[in-house]
Image (cartoon, helix red, strand yellow):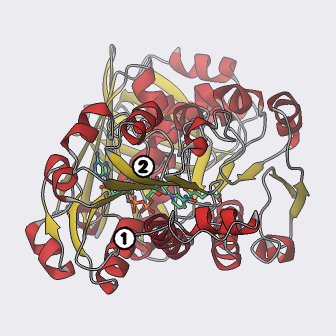
Amino acid sequence: MTYNILISDPLSEDGIYPLRQADGFNIVMETNLTPEQLGERIKDFDALLVRSQTQVTRDIIEKAQHLKIIGRAGVGVDNIDLEAATEHGVIVVNAPDGNTNSAAEHTIAMLMSMARKIPQAFYALRNQNWDRKSYVGVELKNKTLGVIGLGRIGTEVAARAKGQRMNVIAYDPFLTAEKAAKMGVDFGSVEDVIKAADFITVHTPLLKETRHLINAEAFKLMKDGVQIINCARGGIIDENALYDAIKAGKVAGAALDVFEQEPMVDFRLLDLPEVVATPHLGASTIEAQESVAVDVSNDVISYFTTGTVRNSVNLPSVPKEVMAKIEPYFDLAERLGRFLTDLSDGTAEEVNIQYSGELANVEVGPLTRNALKGLLKRHLGDNVNDVNALYLANQKGITVNESKSTTAKGFTNLITMEVKNANGTRTAAGTLLNGQGARIVKVDNYLVDIVPQGHLVFIRHNDRPGVIGRVGTLLGEEGVNIATMQVFRSNAGGDAIMMLSIDKVAEDSGLAQLESLAEIEHVTAINM
Ligand SMILES: NC(=O)C1=CN([C@@H]2O[C@H](COP(=O)(O)OP(=O)(O)OC[C@H]3O[C@@H](n4cnc5c(N)ncnc54)[C@H](O)[C@@H]3O)[C@@H](O)[C@H]2O)C=CC1
Ligand SMILES: O=C(O)CCC(=O)C(=O)O
């Protein structure tokens, strides 16, 4: 099997080396595609690798017929429609760590360039203008840097600013007094930060809550002569409000690497002598580009070879050691889902999954998604996968509940899945038997021992002499060979179930004939 990978933004050749070396990948690099061209090209590809330039819109995702994974060689995924990707079962991965250092260094470079007016002075000098009066700067030492967003990059910037003997005050929703003390920074609300700072730098993602976080109102609260940096995302600072604040003399400097529209179309801000700018170069170093491209390449390889990834943006990430514990159960969970789809007659309305034993102590979200994938696959085919299984279940109005119990009724681990619909509730529980693979050990109230594979026939009947023989004869007449047969009963002469595994898919006519037998209440074919 060969997977087709489209790289639509310039990615480091050294970074994609792992992908070029791996077997089974056909790599095509085509940059500067228009949206229309990308919409056409994407139809042939299993994976798309981008930086920040390619806009992976809903339209592009809907046109992609084979797309399984989008790799963003960088942090911000605001150029990818995550909702559309999730709906279409496309996993999105990014490279969150690879460019942290470069982005932090660029921020410090911008801070210093702005404070000392280096680009402006260079520009004058280049025009053969030896001007030493217009470019008097300010020192950083003993000034306060306000950091909004103390994640990976914000934290690195804060540490470097302390190296410049600056005081740092920060706001981040996850910042605690303990963490702040450990880093040697003060902390407060956004308002506290912007009121106290001589320099302000933002390092948040662009979200609904952070869009125009720095707006006209915020500028009013700032110190006169404040200087401001944005090396995160255009739009966190309201560019019109920034323009007005500079013109009014409130803001003495702005250093911008990112813009509300990229590539930039409105150059008004750059006419102001207080502004220094770069065209989104925060991550543009040889090291960062290699590192982010290696990270996404490895995730793409891992996805197509093992089905797992490290840095998914639209799936909760699961630590490696947890993944090692739950991965062996993926197949069992999916088989339970498949088993119950056939067993339960009607559309599922509620699914309850209980994880017992050792599984009670780990993150089980991926198992639930596999179980739902199994449940939905019969009707949705390959349109369902572990990325969109929960989304599709919710979209179809199925309530999904997870629960855990540390006791597993004699098993090391047990997954019990219950599917409720208008016709009632069906239950199946499964485990992994040491060295013997998956087993279904309970169906409704019956303790069973079923290998969930191949073609099964589930028969609900009355415990009467001769039933087993009649079932065997009838199926034999239909040319159906019974591989295994197990019978379980609640009590002698009472309700009973029979589970057959047969060598081929049972014809409907054969099953209908079984149902015509007086002792048989119901027959269900289950194809695993
Ligand atoms: N200019 C460039 O080339 C680059 C830009 N970036 C951008 O830098 C930004 C930060 O990246 P990382 O530090 O890696 O991300 P991160 O996820 O480690 O940190 C973001 C932080 O922002 C915080 N945050 C979220 N909402 C907030 C709010 N309303 N107020 C204050 N803090 C808030 C989060 O709690 C988190 O700690 C991202 O937007 C990323 O896309 C990243 C790399 C290069
Ligand atoms: O790909 C790039 O150069 C942009 C990096 C960036 O903005 C990010 O990683 O969020």
Q: Secondary structure at mark 2?
A: loop
- Up-down: is 132 above or below 364? below
Q: Position of residue 315 (x, y in %)?
A: 47, 50
Closer-to-camera residue (506/219): 219
Q: For the C terminus, give its image quadrant.
A: top right
Front: mark 1 or 2: 1
- Asked if residue 517 lies left or right of residue 180, the reply is right
Residue density around tag 1, few if under 14, some if 14–19, many if 20 or more, within 10 Å:
few
- Up-down: is 185 above or below 25? below
Q: Is residue 266 visible?
A: yes
Q: Position of residue 193 (x, y in %)?
A: 19, 55
Q: Quadrant of residue 294?
A: bottom right
Q: Secondary structure at mark 1?
A: loop
Q: Quadrant of residue 13?
A: bottom right
Q: For the N terminus, give its image quadrant.
A: bottom right
Which residue appears at 32% of the width and 73% of the height? 158
> Under 8 Å from ligand 1: the CB of mark 1?
no
Q: Amino acid at mark 1?
A: Val
Q: Which residue is mark 2?
A: 205
Closer-to-camera residue (501/132): 132
Q: Which residue is mark 1?
A: 138
Which residue appears at 36% of the width and 66% of the height? 154
Q: Is residue 451 visible?
A: no
Which residue appears at 38% of the width and 52% of the height? 252
- Up-down: is 199 above or below 315? below
- Up-down: is 153 above or below 393? below
Residue density around tag 2, few if under 14, some if 14–19, many if 20 or more, within 10 Å:
many
Q: Quadrant of residue 247?
A: top left
> Of the numbered discs in the image, which one, if any, rests on residue 506?
none
